[in-house]
Image: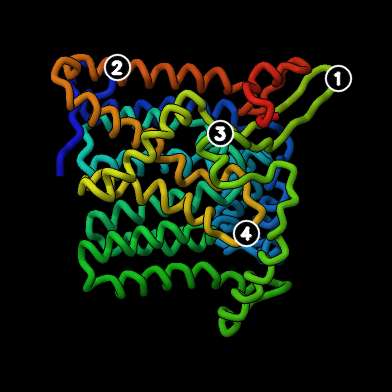
Amino acid sequence: MSALKISDRNLRFFSRKKTFAIFPLVFFAALLISRVHLPENLVFDEIHYVPAAKSLILFQDNLNWVHPPLGKLILGAGWWVFTKSLHLLSEPTVFRWMTLVFGLWVLWAVRGLLLALGYSQTATAAAVWLTGFNGLWFVQSKIAMLDIFYVAFGIWGLLEIHRQRLRGWLHLGLALACKWAALPFFAIGLFMGFNKRPGRLFLGLGLAFAAYFVCFIPLVFLEKNAVPLGSFFSYHTQMLEGFSHLIENTHPYASSWWQWPTLLRPLWYAFDDQSTAEHAVWAGGNPLLYWPALPLLVCVLYFGLFKKDQQARLLSLLYWVPLLFWAFSSRKLQLYYYYLPSSIWVGAVFVWAHEKAWGQYSALRRSRGWTLAGYVLLCGATFLYFLPVMDGRALLPGRHLLYMWLQSWI
């Protein structure tokens, strides 16, 4: 396996051993914490998950029964400890704190997996910064939805499986217990497990099922609509039937899978237009990262399939499997945030492609560190440019139009 290498002499900011590895986490943690209370009201699917989380953690009812319970239990546990018991955090901020923590955990998981793939400290740091600057990760890390939970468990699970540790399957079971959209992580885990230690695969699947099953035990003790353990499988049939009522393309911001990497149909989580100010949460992406990466995403697939490049192969799985899962899904109602698990790897793919290209030409090798650093800074500047329409702050009326580069973004 060939390791990605960048001259530390050319890019010291990114590569001063592990001390500097926490810089992205500190930066994004500070940014998220300063914005986590905005908007002050529930937005988008928070109106479903927040009441469901409170009801579930109090063992009252399972209001959002079409999804597995773990993500809502995590949201509810945070509320029960920090708001109901200790009175430290207000609503809805307390729920967003839970997603914030898992969002940062995602960044650390990305770092761990890229290092395990052979990325240098420098290349890994650059990819982590680009992941934070991609836009969609930031919005999903500050909104009380279930997606950041399953992505965090999923990536950590794959990292542990790559290290040939059985507990990786426990993580994948927990990912699926947050949301069934974690199924692509299972597919990737099966591929990795079969190629590394196939004899332990069935044991790993058993551990995953056990972790998934345990997350349903709290439903046994609900005051209303309890789910006995004997009804575990029939309850899943009911969940599947619930999804069958959501197959029509009726949402005003419905989109198709090919519109996500091309950034043609982002999603508005909130838009409060008042006479004196407007508050917006725009779940878009970073065009300076997404658009140049389009040919590179095809390139990494080619190298993974036909050039036996091990890094390209796993990056291809991480990016393309979740995306193609929705491309072939029978569910017609699809939304931009479904792109989250694939979008996590766009920065890593760009770093991989950058190293491949610069490594071919000796005349360019001495400048490649500076080139990558410059690109990361440009993506960071673009991210900060779009931040006012992503973090829910008050804007002057009509200000959001300055950020709408395409008509389809509105």
Of callouts 2 and 1, the N-terminal one: 1
The image quarter in which residue 119 lies: top left
Q: Residue 275 — which label?
A: 1
Mark 1 or 4: in front is: 4
What is the distance, in whole Å, between disc 3 and disc 4 at their CAs?
20 Å
Query: Residue 339 at what x, y percent from top left?
Result: 52, 44
Q: Residue placed farthest to the bottom in the image? A: 230
Report the amino acid beneath label 4: Arg
Q: Mark 2–mark 1 contact, CB under 8 Å?
A: no
Residue at mark 2: 371
Q: Residue at x 63, y 70 (%)?
A: 240
Mark 2 → mark 1, Cα distance in angstroms: 45 Å
* Coordinates of residue 84 in the picture (x, y in percent): 66, 49
Q: Which residue is mark 3?
A: 263
Whether residue 283 is situated above or below residue 333 in the rendered picture: above
Q: Are marks 1 and 4 in contact (CB under 8 Å)?
A: no
Position of residue 172 relative to residue 220, above or below, is above
N-terminal of the two: label 1 or label 4? 1
Alpha carbon of mark 3 to alpha carbon of mark 2: how far?
25 Å
Local crowd at mark 4 within 10 Å, few (<14), some, or many (≥20)? some
Q: Residues within 10 Å of mark 3 (few under 14, many from 20)?
A: some
Please state which amino acid type lies under the numbered disc 3. Answer: Leu
